[in-house]
Image: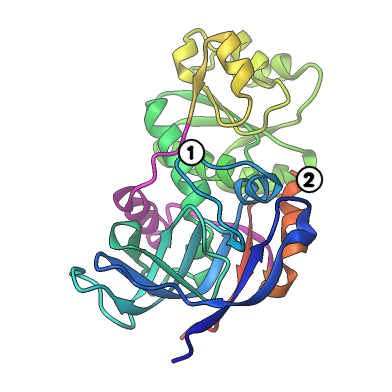
Amino acid sequence: MSATMRAAAIDAVGPPDELRVRELERPAVPDDGILVRVVAAGVQVTDAAIRAGWTPPGAVIRFPQILGNEFSGVIEQTGAEVDGFVHGDEVAGFNTLGCYAEYVAVPASQVVAKPTSVPWQAAGALSASGQTAHTAFEDLAVQGDDVVLVHGAAGGVGSAFTQLAVHAGATVIGTASESNHDYLRALGAIPLEYGPGQAARIRAVSPRVDVAFDAAGHENLRTAVELVADRDRIATIVDMPLAQDLGCRIVRSRRSASRLADLMDRLANGHLGVHIRRSYRLEEVPDAHRDVETGHGRGKIVLDIGEAP
């Protein structure tokens, strides 16, 4: 087995073209860890932010730095202290860095089994957006009789949150560009356009709004505050300074294997879907970053890295 692998890494912070595919040393497997041969890896706005110079809390950037924080793949090797996983198991998982590669080594506590029925791309692009949406859904305590407003409902996080709320029985009003309205209807939401007069359009659909989740930014929180009485039931993942000014919640994902396993079960049972709007080869990762940084389009972007078994 070769001691090297192909990976997309940066040698300095900067624009998407800083990402280059090269041969790097394959990671060692810690006693409590798993080495996974990666099939697919999701591409996140967070990855682009790291490439541009942001360092996640607790992370250390060492050049050449492999990016990527979620994956699906096949177990190649397990550490001496690992139980419950064996060579050849199909899995999905997460790591702050290192997933844009043919192999990634992660703690066993960050990996879950991938059901056979779940496609590789969906499994590889589930964790980041899915766990953020799941955390927000939990923090906002969405109930079946709630009317829920979701800003940016067609994006990766927004669409996952929308589906969780719809499945819980809530009425969901989702804002998105008109080109995504049919998609939101298919998810079970009531779609509305962004822009001036938004609050009036929402009131025309429902005079009562109990919960608001902002995955879009652009000061959409102001509409939420106008409509939702309890600011503890208004949250954002993007407009942090405004949330602090308005007294709304800021959601930070609490990733765990149990949370990912719940999402994976929902995916396998048909209660959750991951829309892949485009996939790229590993060599095309700069284009994937340019795509995700546009902030447009529905669903997720994924890298196809290895062959599925």
Q: Relative to residue 131, is residue 240 drawn left or right?
A: right
As rendered, which of 261 and 210 lies closer to the eye?
261
The residue at the point 50 percent across, 71 percent down is 120
Residue beneath disc 1? 57
Callout 1, which amino acid? Pro
The residue at the point 44 percent across, 23 percent down is 146
Identify the image quadrant of the N terminus: bottom left
Q: Is residue 69 above or below residue 143?
A: below
As drawn, the residue found furthest toward the bottom would be 1
Q: Nearer the viewer, mark 2 or mark 1?
A: 1
Query: Quick check: can you spot residue 66?
Result: yes
Question: Percent from the top left, x then y, of residue 242?
Answer: 63, 16
Q: How many marks?
A: 2
Q: Residues within 10 Å of mark 2 (few under 14, many from 20)?
A: few
Question: In the rendered structure, does residue 185 fall within the stretch colored magenta?
Answer: no
The magenta segment: 252-279
As rendered, which of 158 and 198 lies closer to the eye?
158
Callout 2, which amino acid? Ser
Q: Relative to residue 78, is residue 227 drawn left or right?
A: right
Which quadrant of the view contains residue 159?
top right
Q: Relative to residue 187, is residue 252 drawn left or right?
A: left
As rendered, which of 208 and 91 lies closer to the eye?
91
Q: Is residue 97 above or below residue 81?
A: above
Residue beneath disc 2? 179
Question: Percent from the top left, x then y, of residue 162?
Answer: 53, 39
* Callout 1: SS: loop
The residue at the point 54 percent across, 70 percent down is 40
